[in-house]
């Protein structure tokens, strides 16, 4: 009788810890998306690098986890950032040094096809775009 109770209690604790890890994964995904939007970079992937049980948080027993976030500034190069969570709260984030996204600084064309910009009605042939 007592062993059944201990077995059920252990199973409930394991399920609760698993549930907390899943909640942290969802929160980390939303956090990574919002941070990448703020930095104007493209989120490529996010993964939990490590997790360990800890005391604190809203429920007493919780997890401390480190997440790895991969992002790109130009669609070619890839960078990694780390952030740490304690329970459902993000404690800190560590960004690497990376160049500003180039696609936001690219010159914008205006006008007709071919880049003449509609300077004259005759287009490039009439000397409107030199």
Image (cartoon, grey):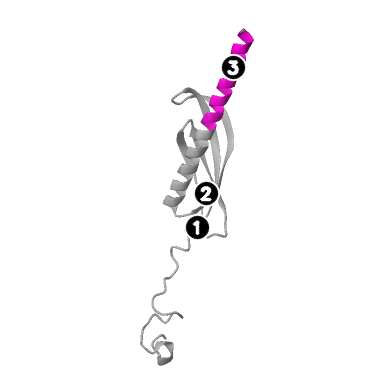
User: How far apart are labels 2 and 3 at the CA level?
Assistant: 45 Å
Residue 59, percent across and down?
A: 46, 23
Residue extending farthest right = 3
Mark before the other along the chain sequence, 3 or 1: 3
- Which label lies toward us, 3 or 1? 3
Residue 50, horizontal then vertical, whole percent: 59, 35
Q: Residue at x 59, y 12 (%)?
A: 5
| Magenta stretch, residue numbers | 2-21
User: Camera-side residue: 70 or 93?
Assistant: 70
Real-space Cα separation, disc 1 to disc 2, in angstroms: 10 Å
Tell me where residue 24 appears, x and y as whole percent.
50, 35
2 or 3: mark nearer the eye: 3
Above-or-below relation of 108 to 86:
below
User: What is the magenta segment's predominant secondary structure?
Assistant: helix
Residue behind mark 1: 99
Q: Quadrant of the C terminus?
A: bottom left
Label 2: state its secondary structure: loop
Pointer 2 with pointer 3, Cβ within 8 A:
no
> Which residue carries the number 3 mark?
8
Looking at the image, residue 123 lies above or below residue 65: below
Q: Is residue 16 above or below residue 45?
A: above
Give me the residue at 47% from left, 63% from top.
Answer: 103
Circle 3 Cα neighbour tier, 10 Å, few/some/many (<14 / 14–19 / ≥20): few
How far apart marks 3 and 1 lie (CA) works out to: 53 Å
Element carrying mark 3: helix
**Residue 126 image point, x, y percent:** 40, 92
Q: Nearer the viewer, residue 98 or 69?
A: 69
Closest to the observer: 5 or 58?
5
Q: Secondary structure at mark 1?
A: loop
Q: Which residue is mark 2?
A: 96
């Amino acid at each position: 009788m007592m062993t059944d109770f201990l077995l059920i209690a252990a199973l409930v604790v394991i399920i609760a810890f698993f549930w907390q890890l899943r909640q942290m994964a969802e929160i980390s995904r939303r956090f990574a998306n919002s941070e990448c939007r703020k930095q104007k970079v493209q989120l490529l992937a996010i993964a939990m690098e490590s997790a360990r049980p800890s005391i604190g948080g809203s429920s007493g027993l919780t997890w401390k986890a480190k997440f790895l976030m991969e992002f790109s500034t130009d669609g070619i190069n890839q960078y990694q950032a780390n952030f740490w969570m304690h329970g459902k709260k993000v404690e800190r984030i560590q960004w690497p040094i990376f160049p500003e996204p180039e696609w936001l600084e690219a010159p914008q064309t205006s006008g007709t096809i071919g880049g003449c910009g509609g300077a004259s009605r005759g287009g490039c042939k009439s000397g409107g775009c030199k």
